[in-house]
Image (cartoon, rainbow, N blue to C red):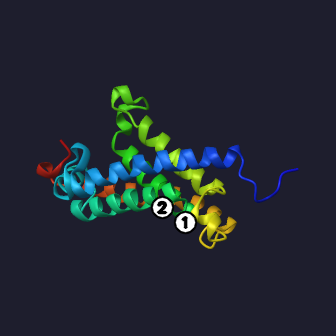
Amino acid sequence: MSNSNTVGLRDVGLLALRVGFGAVMIAHGAQKQFGAFGGHGIEGTGAFFDAVGFRPGVLNARIAAASELGGGALLAVGLATPAAGAAAAGTMLVAGSISREHGFFAQEGGNEYQLVLALVGGALALTGSGRLSLDHSTRHVVDKAWMRVLAASLVVPAAVLVISRREKALASATPDQQTP
């Protein structure tokens, strides 16, 4: 029987997963917010979002960038893991909806990559951050079991709401506003 304060391989694995996934999410957010890593910044991302039906584009780009930057940073340090994981998962589910008509596999332009990222974010929201985290250091003030269940249960409905708003915007668009 192990001591409840002993750091184990599960904790090291969660640390590696959180830091790696958090870094990926931060990079995605930095592309949108700052134009880093070959990204298009808020204005370019906003124009793209407008073109694919996420209107207003700049506002939606800011929300996506904040979810990715904030969620990624919180996951990397292991703070508010349920909310951070849910934010990342929801953003990636919505991102995956853009390319779903191309099928699943990324090599065909599908949403495989986004769905894997959504799965990782959702799994972290449910598992929590482990002992090597700020959540553990703060006695799980913002990482309670009920928060995990609530965050995970809200991801899909929130993503469906955003996706349905996009689909309504596309359906009501005039021919000159249609997605290319």
Q: Is 3 on the left-hand or right-hand side of 47?
A: right
Residue 80 badge:
1
- Secondary structure of the residue carrying numbered label 2: helix
Label 1 crowd bin: few (<14), some (14–19), many (20+), radius 10 Å: many
Circle 2 sits on which residue? 74
Residue shown at 21%/51% (left/top)? Answer: 35
- What is the CA distance from the residue labelled 2 to the residue labelled 1? 7 Å
The image shows residue 71 at horizontal and vertical percentages of: 45, 59
Which residue is pictured at 50% across the width and 61% down the height?
84
Point 44% across, 55% down: residue: 72
Circle 1: residue type: Ala
Is 105 positioned to the left or the right of 155 in the image? left
Instruction: Give x and y (percent) for residue 56.
Output: 23, 63
Residue 1, can we see it? yes
Q: Are marks 2 and 1 in contact (CB under 8 Å)?
A: yes
Query: Is residue 8 found left or right of 89 in the rendered image?
Result: right
Residue displayed at 44% across by 59% down: 73
> Whole-percent x and y of residue 168?
31, 57
